[in-house]
Amino acid sequence: MECKEFLLLISDYIDGTLSSEEQTELEEHLNICPQCRTFANTLKTTITLCQSFYEVPAPIHRSLHHFLRHEWEIHRVQISIGIPKFPFIDLVEKKKQIIVLIELPGFKRKNITLEVSPECIEISGFNEKIEGVYYMNEISCYSFSRKIKLPDLVDTSKVQAKLKNGILKLTLPRA
């Protein structure tokens, strides 16, 4: 089992709806993969802590469970068909440089952190949520973190970054 398959089964594992064969395979994966084991343990601890605070009324519990199940199914489908995480990124290899375009609609420059090493880019950021009563809430990403491995080494002393119209453009000269 790979980590991707583990993520697709974790919801069923927590709900106890896996077949015994799938459960055995998942537990074997947890024994050899420290990242997935940490994720599963953290998730179990979070659930236990939430349950210990107070008894959630049954209608609210059902509604929340339905909502989370729906969101998890969307996430599972996205993983299975290879939809990338937010933000969307284009990475273009050119003769003397690598160009990286990162979609960051509505993000302020002060809320974006960028680290460039010769081998990869790490970017994170957050949007400030507007306080008030939401009648629609479709902009779902308020924070993100991504690490992108570069196809070639770059010279970090000559990196150029420009944020314009919600697109962060990085120009990374080859080392």
Image (cartoon, rainbow, N blue to C red):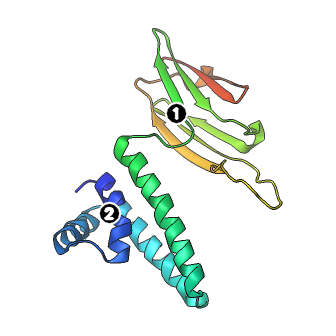
Q: Mark 1 belongs to which amino acid?
A: Ser
At a point 49% along the width and 83% down the height, the residue shown is 48
- Asked if one can make out residue 94 in the rendered structure from this viewpoint, the answer is yes
Q: Residue furthest right?
A: 132
At a point 66% along the width and 35% down the height, the residue shown is 104
Instruction: Point out residue 25 in the picture as x, y percentages from the top left corner.
Output: 19, 66
Frontmost residue, 1 versus 15: 15
Q: CA distance from mark 2 to mark 1?
A: 34 Å
Marks 2 and 1, the one that precedes in the sequence: 2
Residue on which the image places disc 2: 9
At a point 56% along the width and 74% down the height, the residue shown is 63
Q: Secondary structure at mark 1?
A: loop
Q: Residue furthest left?
A: 21
- Asked if one can make out residue 37 in the rendered structure from this viewpoint, the answer is no
Instruction: Point out residue 74 in the picture as x, y percentages from the top left corner.
Output: 46, 53
At a point 57% along the width and 82% down the height, the residue shown is 59
Instruction: Point out residue 32 in the picture as x, y percentages from the top left corner.
Output: 25, 63
Relative to 22, 139 lies left or right: right
Name the quadrant of the N terminus.
bottom left
Residue on which the image places disc 1: 117
Mark 2, mark 1: which one is toward the viewer?
2
